[in-house]
Image: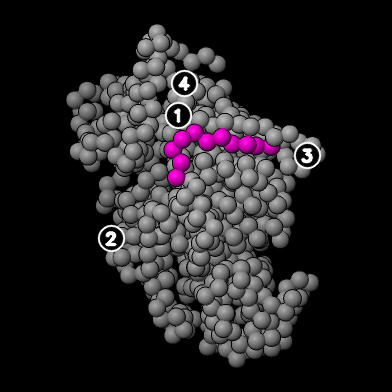
């Protein structure tokens, strides 16, 4: 499948008819929708799953559709330190204890970069690297390159744990350098000169309280350094097209390495590494505006306040509304809203609305919004330079190249989630890749951040689209990596906080989204989910639901994921019990992964202060070995 086909899936308009309503929108992702948690989920979370003791999980050995299948009881004991740490020698246990303890000291964490720089000066480069390998680097990073990480990958595989390869090198930029790069790459020449299109004014009048959307999808200097308030996520800053090509090559090398190391590997990519973020900002704004336009039309029919897929537009009133607004001639609107399936039920839902787009010769025409005064489409910006047009095309080309390499190497590609002002475009591009490359098996996985208020609506819309079109839905569920940054930005700039109000609300959202995907797996076996969580209760919730639904681990529909060096007491018992479980495996040269290590220290401070469970289990296993005469214990595999 060529880049042009990926582009066609995104944009289908006839250039000659660019002013017609049939160009109104694409298969737009739902990113502006309400969430209504089910009472059932709340009850389960509040009572049954406040678990501390080991849980017994009854699973069907193969699949519930196999005649006379006998239940196979699998017991997952997360207190069994012997099994949890079988892959670790005593030196590794001591290193984990030391690193986790150091992460609890605020001064060490807050000043970790300065302390590492000082250590480098005092000890010299060679001794500094050795010290890092003995502590933080050795705990959280697999090695420097594809060859050096192979022993660790092989060892983990021997104990039932796979790998998601993640090249974790980042530029060590000063805040001033990061600010300049971000502002230069997020503001186009046209944006500096162009006033907002008339459609903006219409939306201000119709939804004045939502005028903050325009603020959200613009670059703001005080938040241009996207590294602040971020955990568990690399940050890329655009420099030029050559650097994007180099980062694409790095991702390709990860994909090849993953394919060479296992038959069912994963690799992770970030969209902001593949092109100018200006395109993601602008495309996200257009997608959100189209969703808001749908909501405006629904409100005119008295259908506001419903969930994403419950909200439908009656066809005849819709035609009348569009005609009155002067969006197009009656015949054009009739032609648009008739087809083999579209409008056949007399209504149009969000997915139907999202399908109204056809081929366009220029990528910049993606960024079109309707001028409701003239009835014509207008660009979000008045013009694009030739170079900006090429940059947008190259980003789509790089995405296409990576998806093809994943297919060729038998690797599943996970597209990481990013900030909410980029995410609508990232999700849309990912869904379009899924529609192309997930026809036979789940190759592309989208990431859903469950700390977002709109997370459930985003998941349910994409699940329904996959069901209607018959491709394999692939999701990675995470809680989220940008909470502090997102909240600060929303408060300072003046738009609605996109984050759930508290941790419990996020837990409920995560479990609600997870239950939805598990139910989809139960019904048609074409959905797949990665439960990327360090939360033991969430893992137990998943196992309980799999047991209820008869989902066997051998079907490879439900995966579990944790970061390398963290929560081994969850990962390895799951892997040894036959569940597909993966570690995110970062790698890269010592000096170049220091930003990643800095975040690991910050993240562990929060985790280890909140719970001493992992350290307690590590001490328990170390004492068991010492008292049992296993001072020189070495893993056997």
**Among the two numbered marks 1 and 3 on one chain, the one whose residue lies closer to the N terminus:** 3
**SS type, badge 4:** helix
Applied colour scheme? one colour
Residue drawn at (24%, 23%), measured in percent from left and top? 124
Residue bearing mark 4 = 82
Give the mark toward the camera: 1 or 3: 1
Q: Is residue 314 left or right of residue 299?
A: right
**SS type, badge 2:** helix
Residue furthest bottom in the image: 324
Q: Is residue 343 above or below residue 470?
A: below
Residue bearing mark 2 = 222
- Image location of residue 459, percent across then percent down: 57, 58
Mark 4 touches mark 1? (CB < 8 Å): no
- Image location of residue 228, percent across then percent down: 31, 51
Residue drawn at (47%, 73%), measured in percent from left and top? 381
Residue drawn at (22%, 23%), measured in percent from left and top? 123
Distance in Å between CA atoms under marks 3 and 2: 58 Å
Q: Quadrant of residue 94?
A: top left
Mark 1 touches mark 3? (CB < 8 Å): no
Residue bearing mark 3 = 66
**Among the two numbered marks 2 and 4 on one chain, the one whose residue lies closer to the N terminus:** 4
Disc number for residue 79:
1
Q: Is residue 54 magenta?
A: yes
Magenta region = 50-60
- Of residues 455 and 154, the one drawn nearer to the viewer in this rendering: 455
Q: Is residue 256 magenta?
A: no
Distance in Å between CA atoms under marks 2 and 4: 49 Å
Residue furthest front in the image: 47
Mark 3 touches mark 2? (CB < 8 Å): no
């Amino acid at each position: 499948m060529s880049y042009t086909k990926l582009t066609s899936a995104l944009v289908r308009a006839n250039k000659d008819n660019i002013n017609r309503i049939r160009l109104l929108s694409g298969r737009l992702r739902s990113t502006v929708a309400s969430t209504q948690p089910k009472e059932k989920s709340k009850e389960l979370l509040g009572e049954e799953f406040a678990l501390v003791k080991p849980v017994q999980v009854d699973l069907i050995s193969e699949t519930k559709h196999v005649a006379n299948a006998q239940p196979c009881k699998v017991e997952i004991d997360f207190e069994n330190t012997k099994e949890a740490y079988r892959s670790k020698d005593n030196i590794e246990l001591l290193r984990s204890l030391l690193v986790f303890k150091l992460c609890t000291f605020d001064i060490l964490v807050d000043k970790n970069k300065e302390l590492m720089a000082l250590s480098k000066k005092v000890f010299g480069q060679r001794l500094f690297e050795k010290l890092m390998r003995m502590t933080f680097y050795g705990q959280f990073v697999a090695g420097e390159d594809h060859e050096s990480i192979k022993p660790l990958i092989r060892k983990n595989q021997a104990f039932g744990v796979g790998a998601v390869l993640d090249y974790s090198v980042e530029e060590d930029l000063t805040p001033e350098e990061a600010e300049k790069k971000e502002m230069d790459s997020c503001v186009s020449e046209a944006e500096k000169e162009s006033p907002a299109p008339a459609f903006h004014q219409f939306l201000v009048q119709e939804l004045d309280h939502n005028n903050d959307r325009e603020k959200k999808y613009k670059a703001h200097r005080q938040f241009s350094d996207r590294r602040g308030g971020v955990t568990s996520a690399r940050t890329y800053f655009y420099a030029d097209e050559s650097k994007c090509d180099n980062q694409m090559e790095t991702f390709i090398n990860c994909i090849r390495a993953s394919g060479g190391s296992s038959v069912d590997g994963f690799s992770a990519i970030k969209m902001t590494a593949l092109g100018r973020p200006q395109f993601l900002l602008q495309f996200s704004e257009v997608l959100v505006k189209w969703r808001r336009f749908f909501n405006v039309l629904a409100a005119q029919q008295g259908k506001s306040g419903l969930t994403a897929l419950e909200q439908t537009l009656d066809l005849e009133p819709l035609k009348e509304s569009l005609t009155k607004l002067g969006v197009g001639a009656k015949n054009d609107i009739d032609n648009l809203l008739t087809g083999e399936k579209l409008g056949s039920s007399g209504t149009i839902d969000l997915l139907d609305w999202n399908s109204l787009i056809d081929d366009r010769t220029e990528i910049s025409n993606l960024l079109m919004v309707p001028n409701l005064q003239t009835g014509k489409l207008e660009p979000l910006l008045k013009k694009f330079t030739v170079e900006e047009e090429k940059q947008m095309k190259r980003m789509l080309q790089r995405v296409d190249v990576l998806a093809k390499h994943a297919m060729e190497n038998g690797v599943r590609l996970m597209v990481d989630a990013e900030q909410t002002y980029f995410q609508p475009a990232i999700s849309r591009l990912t869904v379009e890749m899924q529609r192309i490359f997930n026809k036979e098996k789940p190759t592309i996985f989208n990431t859903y951040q469950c700390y977002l208020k709109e997370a459930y609506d985003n998941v349910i819309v994409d699940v329904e689209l996959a069901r209607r079109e018959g491709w394999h839905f692939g999701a990675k569920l995470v809680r989220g990596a940008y909470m502090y940054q997102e909240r600060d930005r929303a408060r300072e700039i003046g738009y609605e906080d996109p984050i759930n109000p508290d941790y419990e609300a996020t837990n409920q959202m995560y479990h609600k989204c997870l239950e939805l995907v598990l139910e989809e797996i139960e019904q048609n076996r074409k959905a797949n989910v990665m439960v990327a969580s360090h939360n033991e209760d969430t893992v137990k919730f998943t196992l309980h639901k799999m047991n209820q639904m008869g989902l066997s681990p051998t079907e490879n529909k439900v995966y579990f994921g944790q970061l390398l060096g963290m929560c081994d007491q969850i990962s390895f018992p799951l892997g040894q019990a036959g569940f597909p479980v993966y570690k995110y495996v970062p790698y890269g040269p010592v000096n170049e992964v220091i930003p990643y290590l800095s975040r690991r220290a910050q993240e562990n401070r929060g985790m280890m202060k909140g719970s001493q469970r992992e350290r307690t289990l590590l001490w328990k296993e170390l004492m068991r070995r010492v008292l049992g005469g296993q001072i020189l214990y070495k893993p056997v595999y």
